[in-house]
Amino acid sequence: MDSQLSEAIRDAAAHARRRAETYTPAINKDALPWRVIEVFDERVRGSIERDRRVEDERDRVLIAAVKLAETPTNDEAEIGAARKHLVDAIDYLEQAVLRFGIPNGRKRQPQ
């Protein structure tokens, strides 16, 4: 895997983690899952061959983001657990892409 793609993967994961860690219930709940994976979809997903393992991990991130968005706002412990679950899912997605992602040779979009 080339260094540009590896850097794009790391940047996408860092962006997703920032979104997860700074999420507040005031943010549009329907938008959170897409905001979490937006950089991954823009810069990484189109640059690697489709792989079930990567797509499964992407789906896990989306599901974890929905769970965080739907967590009751009055329970800080639940919000913390849901946020940790989302960050863990992001970590697994990053690892899956680095491990299984095969560059497809398509030109990546500019940053």
Image: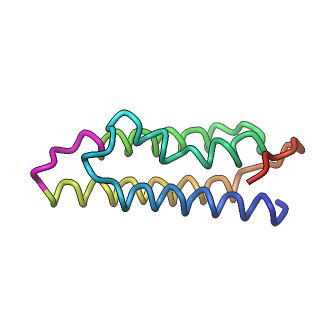
> Residue visible at 33% across and 38% down?
28
Magenta stretch, residue numbers: 69-75
| Render colour scheme | rainbow
> Residue visible at 37% across and 45% down?
64
- Report the front residue among 8 and 78: 8
Up the image or down, 49 lies above or below 78; here it is above
The location of residue 74, given as percent across then percent down, is 10, 51
Q: Is residue 96 left or right of residue 25?
A: right
The location of residue 65, given as percent across then percent down, is 38, 44
Q: Image quarter for residue 37?
A: top right
Look at the image and say whether residue 56 sits in the magenta stretch.
no
| Residue closest to the far left | 74
> Residue visible at 15% across and 48% down?
73
The location of residue 56, given as percent across then percent down, is 54, 39
Look at the image and say whether residue 71 sits in the magenta stretch.
yes
**Dominant secondary structure (helix, strand or loop) of the stretch shown in magenta:** loop
The location of residue 13, given as percent across then percent down, is 56, 59
> Residue visible at 69% across and 42% down?
45
Q: Image quarter for residue 71?
A: top left
Q: Image quarter for residue 94?
A: bottom right
- Report the front residue among 75 and 111: 111
| Residue closest to the far top | 30
